[in-house]
Amino acid sequence: MIRKTFVPLLLLLAVALPIAPTTAIGDTLDDLLAETQKARGAEAAANAAREKEFLANRDQQQQMVEEAQAKWNAAKARSDQLSSSFDTNEVTLADLETKLKAREGNLGELFGVTRQVAGDSAAIVFNSLTSAQFPGRDQFFIKLAKAKALPNITEFEDLAFELLREITESGRVVRWNNEIVTAEGEKESTEVVRIGGFIAMAGDRYLAYNPTLGTFSVLPRQPSGELRDAAIELTEAKSGYTRAFVDPSRGVLLALYVQRPNVMERIEKGEEVGYVIILVGVIGLVCSIYQLFYLILVRRRVTRQLANLDTPTRDNPLGRVLATFRGDAETLEDDVEVVELRISEAVLREVPPVERFQAFLRLAVAAGPLLGLIGTVIGMIITFQSITESGSSDPKLMAAGIGQAMIATVLGLGIAIPLLFINAGLSTLSRAIVQVLDEQSNGLLAEHIERKAGDTAVRGGPRV
C-alpha cells in the first residue's frame, strides 16, 4: 500500500525536479521506507502502552466498584439490623411507658399539679418584697415549672418550704440591712423595714421593689408628712405597737398616691385665673378676720356699757350714742322730732364701722364662682385646642385643660362658700350690735318724751 501511495508521488517529483542519478533515488526510498516502518513501530508501541494502561485502570476501577458494592451491602445490612432493633425498642418502650403510667397512679396527677403550682407561684415570688431578703427563689419555681420528669422528694420538700416561707413572711414585720438605690441613682446600705409583702421603708423614705434587679429603690416622690411620720415611728420602734400604713396592692396604690399633686401644684394648674381667685379670697379673709376681732371687741364693750347706762363712755358705739343726749341739759333739744332725728343721726353714724367690709364680702361670694367659670371656660378652650392640634382625643392631652378648668371651679367655690358663712356670721354680730343701739336710742327718745311731758305738767299744762 505504501508503494502504491509513494510511486505516483515520486513520479511527480521526477517530472518536476531535475533528473538525479539513479543511485540517489534508490537510497531515498529505502530511507523513507525505513523511517516509515520506524514511525509505525513507535506508534504501535505507544498504542500498546496505552492499551496496557487502560486495561490496568479498568481492573482498578472494577476493584473499586466491587469494594463500594461490598460497603453498600454491609451498610444496608446494618441499616436493616438497626431498623429492626428500633422497631423492637419502640414496642418495648411503649410497654414500659404503659407499665410506668400504671405504676405512677396518682403521681402523674401530682406532677401536673406541682408544675401548675410552681408556675403560678413563680410570678408571685418574683414580684414579692420578700425576694429582696431571700434572692434567687424564683429560679427554683421556674425550673420546677419547666421540669419534664417527676420531681424527687427533695424538690417537693423545697417547694413546700418556699410556699410556707412566703406565707409566713407575708405576716411578719422584719428589719434587716440591705442595699438600696437612692433617688439620685446612688447605692446606699441602710436598715430596711418590711411589713409583710406589702410595703417597705428606710427611715422616713418609702421604697419600691424592682424585681428585675432584685433591689429596693427610693420613690422619687415621697408621700405626705403624715405617712412619713408613721414610717419614722415604725422604724424607731423597738417593741410594742405603733401605727403604720399598709398598701394591700403591694406598691401599686402607693405609687399612684405619691403622684397626686399637692395643694400648691393644684393651685399652679389654675394659672392666672386661679391666682386672681386666691387673691380675692385672701383679701376677703383678711378683712373678715379684722372685722371679726373688731366686732367681738365692740360687743364686749357694748355689753359692759349696758351694765352701766348712767355713765356712758366713748370707747363703744352705745356709749357715744348715750353721751350725745345725757350731757349738759342746756344742749338738749326740746322738740321731740329734732331729738328723734338727732338719735337717728347718732345711730347711723355708728352703723358703718359695725357693718364694714360686708358689702365686699358679698361681692367676693358672688364673684368667686364667676371667676371659677372663667377658668373653666379657659380650660375647655385649651382642651379643644389640644384635640384640634393633635387630631386625636387622647385623654392625656385633654387632662391638662380639664384639670385647669376643674381647679378654677374648685377655687372659685372654695373662696365663695367660706366667705358666705363668714359674712353671715359677721352680719349676725353686726345686727346684734345695731339692735342694741336701736333699742337704747328708742329708750332715749321715750325717756326724753316722758321728761318733756313731766315738765309741762309741772308748769300747769300746755298753753292754748
Image (cartoon, rainbow, N blue to C red):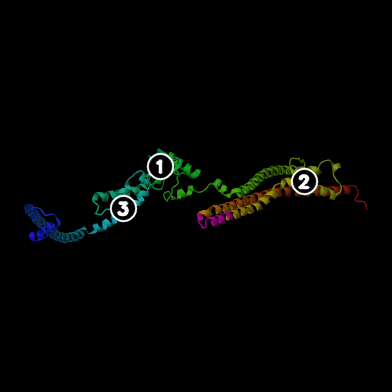
Tell me, yes or no, if residue 73 can be seen here. no
Question: In whole angstroms, how far apart are the C-alphas of marks 3 and 1?
Answer: 28 Å
| Residue carrying label 2 | 349
Dot 3 amino acid type: Ala
**Furthest residue to the right?**
464
**Which label sits in the foreground, 1 or 2?**
1
User: Residue 439: x and y, percent?
Assistant: 75, 49
Q: Nearer the viewer, residue 251 or 195?
A: 251
Magenta segment boundaries in residue numbering: 381-395
In the rendered image, residue 12 lying in the magenta stretch gets the answer no
Could you say whether the residue bearing mark 3 is in a helix, strand or loop? helix
| Residue carrying label 3 | 118
Could you say whether the residue bearing mark 2 is in a helix, strand or loop? helix
| Residue carrying label 1 | 193
Question: In whole angstroms, how far apart are the C-alphas of marks 1 and 2?
Answer: 69 Å
**Image quarter of the N terminus:** bottom left
- Earlier in the chain: of badge 1 and badge 2, it is 1
